[in-house]
Amino acid sequence: MKLKNTLNLILTLPLILLFCACEDPIDVNLAEADPVLVVDAWVNGQAEDQRIFLTQSQPFFDSVPLRGVKGATVQLRTLMDTYTFEDNGNGEYLWNPSPSQPQLGQDGDDFQLTITVNGTTYESISKRNPVPTIDSITFRFEEGNAFFPDSHFAEFWSRDIVGPGNTYWIKAYKNGELLRAADEINIAFDGGFSAGGNFDGVEFIRPIRDAINPLIDDEDNGGFLSPYVNGDSVYVEIHSLTNEAFFFLNEVAIQTNRQGGFAELFAAPLSNVPTNIVKTSGDGASVVGFFNVASIATNGKRFVP
Amino acid sequence: MKKLFLFYLVLLTLSTAPIITMAQEKHTISGYIRDMSDGESLIGATAYVKELGSGTVSNAYGFYSITLASGQYNLEFKYLGYQTVLKAIDLKGNITLDIELSNAQTKLQEVVITESMEDDNVSSISMGSSRLDVQTIQKLPAFLGEADVLKSIQLLPGISSVGEGASGYNSRGGSVGQNLILLDEAPVYNSSHLFGFFSVFNPDAVKDTQLFRGAIPSKYGGRISSILDVRMKDGNNKCYSTSGGIGTVFSRLAFEGPIVKNKGSFIVAARRSYIDVLAAPFTDVLDDGAGLNFYDLTMKANYKLSSKDHVYLSGYLGRDRFMFDERQGFSWGNATSTLRWNHLFSDRLFSNFTLVYSDYDYELAFGDTDRDKFDWNSNINSYIFKPEFTYFLNSDNEMTFGGEAIYYTFEPANAVGVSNGNVQDISLDRKYNLETSVYIGNRQTVNPVLTLEYGLRFSSFRLFGPGTAIDYGEAPRPGLRRDTVSTTFFGSGKTIAEYSNFEPRLSFKVQLSSYSSIKGSYNRMAQYLHLISNTTASNPLDVWVPSSNNIEPQIGQQVSLGYFANLGKEESLEVSVEGYYRKAENQIDYIDGADLLINERLEGDLLSGEGRAYGLELSVKKDAGRFSGWMNYTIAKTELQVEGINRGEWYSTRFDQPHNFKIAAFYELNKRMTLSGNFVFNTGTPITFPTSRVIQRDLPVIPYNANDSRNNVRLPNYHRLDLALRVDGKKEKKGRVRKNNDYWVFSFINVYNRRNAFSIYFAENEELIADNVLPTEAVRVSIIGSIIPAISYNFNFNCL
């Protein structure tokens, strides 16, 4: 995650300045393993179509389209309601809002997810947590330095909800395109980086506010380009998370954000990301993936100097 | 402290013991063995009684003592690379005999030079122990031309490392945090400059390095894997001298000389990296107060108060600084000081009292305004008092006893975060600890065939308040985070957790013939501090944590057995085969996604398991002649078993190397040129590879091991050849010996340009994304990816 990224940069920059580590893409053989069921159940409380994806894991190097799992039943339940996701083909299960069910529950609702595939049942629970509003988005000018030319940086302003243990995923879109790279996963625990940090009720800390800026390599001159220029738009969403979902994304960031080079000296060993989905009956494949019901706050701005 | 008092009682008893034994008309020859040229005491020099065919060796301060019946004796004083001194003695009463040996390098005529301690390998009881003197370290090809103590250690048998650039070393399958590194008896918590590329020991100020990885005498404790005892030079007590060098990375300068001739001396040695100075004109990265440097200062002074008393004061101060600008950056460093007082209660009872202060700290700051910033510093302080005694009972028994009290404070995080002007103190509690131990040991020559060394150490450890103890519940399943059940506050001085351990040590030697012996040893050791690190190489931010109500002390046990022989012409080839088996309890591992930095609930993220390691070390060494060097081959295995990792099955550690082969060779081309080389081969270390990919919306491809394996694949084998040529300046000028010496070292690391894999990582390659399919790749990282040449110039001006 971000603190880790920053530390990695701090730890390795001196090395980069002094020596050069070499990286070569190579061919390796990987052990075989049975496919597992991959559940992608990131849904939210917006009044719009919601999708859950069921796929099979593939060998790591298989760059082929995902193999969807068809014919499953997928249901979400709260104390009051049942939401049924219909098989839409190719592993996609779709729920449409209706006048009687305009959205998935309310803030504070507990949800249960039940998936049945060929007689095997998988279950998970999540809670729809509240999300703070995004008060504003601002742009800030900074004079050029060793890494950036004269640049414009975007910053979003929002304050963590008071009380310990509020967790969020901040997604940023530049000109409609999601910043989805491994080093762009932007999550917050009580406005800070991690649970141990003991922050609470603060404005999201600066590195999190700043993480909505893409790092664009300057191919010609080295360093980076200004993240935003005249006419660019930025759109920010804060998704509320359960703590389990925060730890999952934190692990995803650690496992996927491999900066290579000297950073490998201080890289954590490869380990499996956690899951909050359990197999409750049947002898089907084991399961990975995650279930979270988010509330979403949004804000956007176009940069006009 | 009661235990220490008991030892004083023992001491009193022993001071009266000579009166009783005196009845047999025995007398003691004792004194110091020193280098004639600069007065440096010689550690491990031999005083050999020809008539008895046995002798003794000088201790860490150069002191020796032999007690013999009245009579005529011929004593031989020997030290590797020095001229042997013979003394005929008519022993009628106690004699003080200080000896000065002359270094072979200053020889003009043919005299007897001890070119190899021919029988030391076979006749000494020590096993699993290696000594490296600084001359040897300086001859080895060195990374960027900088002679380095810790890198040289890695050429010894049984020693490995996870890869280039990794700090510390692994001894017989132990982790980096299981080695106690002592610099003049002060513990060094982080022995690296620039992460792991260089070590903190300045070779100009180091006299002697001894590594214990097998039989560990009872006077050492606190870590379960190995002890590296680095001793600093005392300083030239005859005349003022200076030495130094200019290398690719460091410039070094040392100055030494007498305080009062033959009574006291000092040495001051400094190093500083100058990459920032050289780079400054070419880059603006280093403007705005940015800095990139590391330095160290090593100092020592000693003074002989009387014939019975000698005091030593030594200190080390070193720091690495990496600053992006005035406010943001990262720095770490060690500061140690040691005050020692040697006192001779009698010519058979040598004592040393040591006071040590050691501090390790790091500091991290980012945020370029006061409204948004993060400042974090952390430190470990230790205060140590260590009395130790050596009692030379008679020519067959040498007793050592003493104690150690260490008071530690740990400050894991003194940290402040500011977000948009809102200040949050996110500091963690300090931790207070006391570790005490007492020990006694004896080296006994039972008969010409059998020698024993046995001892017992009793150690105890206490974590006390003020502080909060957290109790954790069971994990939902092994390998997951344990949640807090309750917290208890303990007032100042109240015990939070307490542990104690008996640590027996035993070794034996059976002399088979004048050129061969069998040795064996057993030791049990306890370690109360734990290095918390889940990255491939240890880094300066890794925290040390004390044992607590949740973390039990690590216990290590080792048995080893070896055969030692001197073969070849004049028995100049030292050969040994040693096998060992190690078992370790309470080994720390981490849950997936463990949060190790500034986390008051850290202990809930730790797992505990068992370790085992076994191996066979084969070593061949040749000290004498124009062609010298050594060859070591180790076949070994080191594994861990931790509930919640690798399906609960045994797995290889990240530094496990089944085959490890290394050669260091030196060849004197002529009087002024020495060619040296080393070659290293080892099996690739294990690493975890994924089997599958997992896709989640809006996230990169997640590598996944569906078999839940840890360290299931090996990196390609590692091999590397390094060469160096040392060219000495002329030794003589107009037929007279020059006072000044200088030499150039030309070194080439990784001569045949191999890209050894440090690791292989798996990631999505964003540049290759097409048709909505996310391509992935495996990437090999080599830390040293090409041949690295370097030049250094070194000089010393003797007796200015």
Image (spheres, coloured by chain):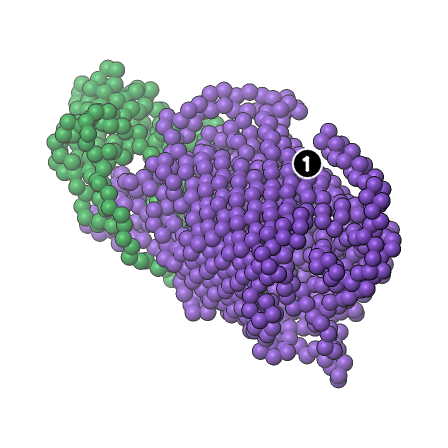
Chain colours: A green, B purple
Displayed quadrant of residue B264: bottom right
Residue B757, given in percent of the width and then of the height, sits at: 39, 57
Furthest-top residue in view? A80
Residue B708, given in percent of the width and then of the height, sits at: 32, 39
Q: Residue at x 63, y 34 (%)?
A: B459
Is B722 drawn above or below residue A17 in the view shown?
Answer: below
**SS for dot 1:** strand
Left or right, residue B123 beside residue B71: left
Which quadrant of the figure contains the C terminus of chain B?
bottom right
Hey, what amino acid is under mark 1? Answer: Val
Q: Residue at x 56, y 48 (%)?
A: B520
In this view of the protein, can residue B506 be seen by the observer? Answer: yes
Is B264 drawn above or below residue B12 in the view shown?
Answer: below
In depth, the one of B724 and B533 nearer the eye is B724
Residue A194, given in percent of the width and then of the height, sits at: 45, 34
In depth, the one of B576 and A15 nearer the eye is B576
Is B4 drawn above or below residue B787 in the view shown?
Answer: above
Which quadrant of the figure contains the N terminus of chain B?
top right
Q: Residue at x 67, y 50 (%)?
A: B447
**Residue holding disc 1:** B438
| Crowding near the residue tagged with mark 1, few <14, some 14–19, many ≥20 C-alpha atoms within 10 Å | many
